[in-house]
Image (tube, rainbow, N blue to C red):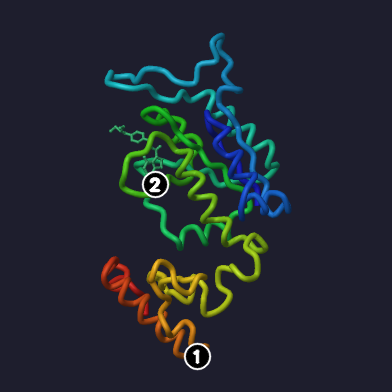
Amino acid sequence: MKLALITLFPDVIENFKAYGVTGRAVAENKIDLQSFNPRDYATDKHRTVDDRPYGGGPGMVMRCEPLIAAVQAARDWMKDEALVVYLSPQGKRLVQARTEELAVEEQNLILIAGRYEGIDQRAIDNLVDEEISIGDYVLSGGELPALVLIDAILRHVPGVLGHAESAGQDSFSEEALEGGLDWPHYTRPEVFEGQTVPKVLLSGDHKLIEKWRSQQATAKTRKMRPDLILNRKN
Ligand code: 9D3
């Protein structure tokens, strides 16, 4: 999968490309992740990427021309069709099912991260196929949302997760949780400052352990996220 991130702050993706599950995916060529900075495509004397909003008001707006040129550069790099996603507070809220669809259906993604008050509406009209928000809270720009989206998509790309952590692998998978929350996890030591590990986990009785985990997960979900139970498809 090819991913292009349009951003005024290309440095924010460098750590993401270097470390962890995502770093390995880049190293093993499972994904190709490049950033394109609109500032590099601004043609005016001062290489401006933002300007004051028509109609007045606070803040600045990202200009059309550098954005459109940066997206064009991303398209040229991809040499193929791409879905263009604008990370925006006005977007549809991201859910797990959409991350899977994007991973399965799209070969190339261009993600636009906005700064300031957002981007000129004509850039949206000319470029954008889909607007996505990551939730109802105010951030300073689209870079973190873009990384959130990339991370969630990559987990569905074949070969990105190792066998043990694979998304739909066994009874300990994301699928096994069926839209509910996780059970509590414990590792060594068996006693930490007087706090013990639940006895069932030391019993070696895998049937009983599975039952306990399922009960714990259901109780936690009912307490923390009753909406997940009400919206469940089974
Ligand atoms: C305080 C500024 N707001 C004035 C009403 C509007 C506003 C503009 C730009 C609010 C946030 C942003 C920057 N946010 C994003 O670009 C963004 C975002 C978010 O803030 N929350 C959740 N998802 C996303 S996706 C992109």
Residue type for callout 2? Ser
* Crowd class of label 2 (few under 14; some 14 to 19; many from 20; radius 10 Å): many
**Above-or-below relation of 160 to 199:** above
- Label 2 near ligand 1 (CB < 8 Å): yes
Assign ligand 1 to one image quadrant. Answer: top left
Front-most of residues 114 and 176: 176
Marks 1 and 2, how far apart in space?
44 Å
Residue in the picture at 37% in, 17% down = 52
In this figure, which residue is indicated by the disc labeled 2? 133
Residue type for callout 1? Asp
In this figure, which residue is indicated by the disc labeled 1? 205
**Above-or-below relation of 141 to 130:** above
Front-most of residues 133 and 179: 179
**Above-or-below relation of 35 to 149:** above
Q: Quadrant of the C terminus?
A: bottom left
Count all numbered tags in the image, as a single digit: 2
